[in-house]
Image (tube, rainbow, N blue to C red):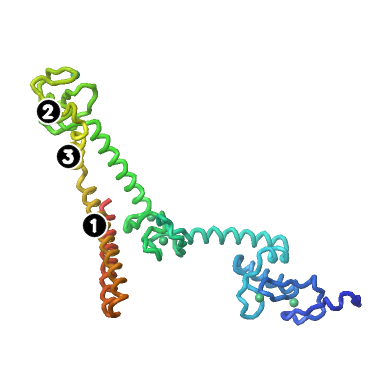
């Protein structure tokens, strides 16, 4: 009972082997495969109820094309469309947790995918970083511990800077004494008077510009004096901090060494035979291992 006008528009579906389906009851995916709406709906319903959302594939045999989200939404019932959207959001959030940009500066342009959301990764640009906090690699420390430690280090160096600017060590008992008044005479709780500028022991008798019997020559030479003091105060860093820094520093050195070896290796690979290049490969692997274990060692101090 079909009208003559729609005769040439009738199509067939390869899934349900139905002929004479009007074209408006057929849907063609971007891959070019076209099936009837009832078959698509059936397909989407099964997939969504299985918890799938973003990667629902075309029904055609061996076609890996992903079905367009809008088409899926349009063809299923409203309740299922809602479910589909919820799964979509969830899977995007899930994906975002698994994909992060490499934090290299300048940015290398790479995104890294990882199944669990912490631990260390290495970008193809060579940067090793923590996938959890995007900071430098810090195993065996947890991200939280690492953050606390970094904050503490920053605060500590701030404290040292403040101490350098505002305290002077007593020449008798070695306690740090805060400078309170504006003149250059300092008095320690042990009773010792001393000069703010040079730290040398003095008597109490003084004026604004001089301490009687004391001439350290620092009154006009502030810059040099600051330098000297900074040098001495750096010794006040605590032992473990020093240890940490020592390891971190050698890590930097080894990094430099690795790069120069790599450069040599590349140069050699162009001129010499493969065996030589393989030798370098071995050295580079060794260096990698060294820097990795060094990092673990230095990070175990906090
Ligand atoms: Zn297809
Ligand atoms: Zn069909
Ligand atoms: Zn990178
Ligand atoms: Zn971390
Ligand atoms: Zn004292
Ligand atoms: Zn005074
Ligand atoms: Zn002095």
Question: Please, what secondary structure does the residue beneath circle 1 have?
Answer: helix
Question: Please, what secondary structure does the residue beneath circle 3 have?
Answer: helix
- Indicate which disc, 1 or 2, sits on the residue closer to the N terminus: 2
Where residue 116 appears, as percent x and y from the top left, is: 44, 63
Q: Residues within 10 Å of mark 2 (few under 14, many from 20)?
A: few
Residue at x 28%, y 50% (from the top left corner): 302
Residue 294 in sight here: yes
Q: Vertically, is 123 above or below 167? A: below
- Indicate which disc, 1 or 3, sits on the residue closer to the N terminus: 3
Q: Which residue is mark 3?
A: 232
Some atom of ligand 7 lies within 8 Å of the CB belonging to the residue at label 2: yes
Residue at x 82%, y 77% (from the top left corner): 10
Q: Residues within 10 Å of mark 3 (few under 14, many from 20)?
A: few
Where residue 143 appears, as percent x and y from the top left, is: 37, 53
Where residue 2 appears, as percent x and y from the top left, is: 90, 76
Q: Which residue is mark 2?
A: 216
Q: Which mark is residue 287?
A: none
Distance between the alpha carbons at the discs numbered 1 and 2: 39 Å
Q: Vertically, is 52 above or below 249? A: below
Residue 51 in sight here: no
Distance between the alpha carbons at the discs numbered 1 and 3: 23 Å
Whether tag 1 and tag 2 are in contact, CB under 8 A, the answer is no
Some atom of ligand 7 lies within 8 Å of the CB belonging to the residue at label 3: no
Dividing the image into four quarters, tell me where ligand 3 lies.
Answer: bottom left
Residue 196: quadrant of the picture: top left
- Using the image as rendered, state which of residue 37 and residue 177 is in the foreground: 177
- Using the image as rendered, state which of residue 188 and residue 277 is in the foreground: 277
Q: Which mark is residue 250?
A: 1
In the displayed orientation, state which residue is furthest to the left: 213
Residue 138: quadrant of the picture: bottom left
Number of residue marks = 3
């Amino acid at each position: 009972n079909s009208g003559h006008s729609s005769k040439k528009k009738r199509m067939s579906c390869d899934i349900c082997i139905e002929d004479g389906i009007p074209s408006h009851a057929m849907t063609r995916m971007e891959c070019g495969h076209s099936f009837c709406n009832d078959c698509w709906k059936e397909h989407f319903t099964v997939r969504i109820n299985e918890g799938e959302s973003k990667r629902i594939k075309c029904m055609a045999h061996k076609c890996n094309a992903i079905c367009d989200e809008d088409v899926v939404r349009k063809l299923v019932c409203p309740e299922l469309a809602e479910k589909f959207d919820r799964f979509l959001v969830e899977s995007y959030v899930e994906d975002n947790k698994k994909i992060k940009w490499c934090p290299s500066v300048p940015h290398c342009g790479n995104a890294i995918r990882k199944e669990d959301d912490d631990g260390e990764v290495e970008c193809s640009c060579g940067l090793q970083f923590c996938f959890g906090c995007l900071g430098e690699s810090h195993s065996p420390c947890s991200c939280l511990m690492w953050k606390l430690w970094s904050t503490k280090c920053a605060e500590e160096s701030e404290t040292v800077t403040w101490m350098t600017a505002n305290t002077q060590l007593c020449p008798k008992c070695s306690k740090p004494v805060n400078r309170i008044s504006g003149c250059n005479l300092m008095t320690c709780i042990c009773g010792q008077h001393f000069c703010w500028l040079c730290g040398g022991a003095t008597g109490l008798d003084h004026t604004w510009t001089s301490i009687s019997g004391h001439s350290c020559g620092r009154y006009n030479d502030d810059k040099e004096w600051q330098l000297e003091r900074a040098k001495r105060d750096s010794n006040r860093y605590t032992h473990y901090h020093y240890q940490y820094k020592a390891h971190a520093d050698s890590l930097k050195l080894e990094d430099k060494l690795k790069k120069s070896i790599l450069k040599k290796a590349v140069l050699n690979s162009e001129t010499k035979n493969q065996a030589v290049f393989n030798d370098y490969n071995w050295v580079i692997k060794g260096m990698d291992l060294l820097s990795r274990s060094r990092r673990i060692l230095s990070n175990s101090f906090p």
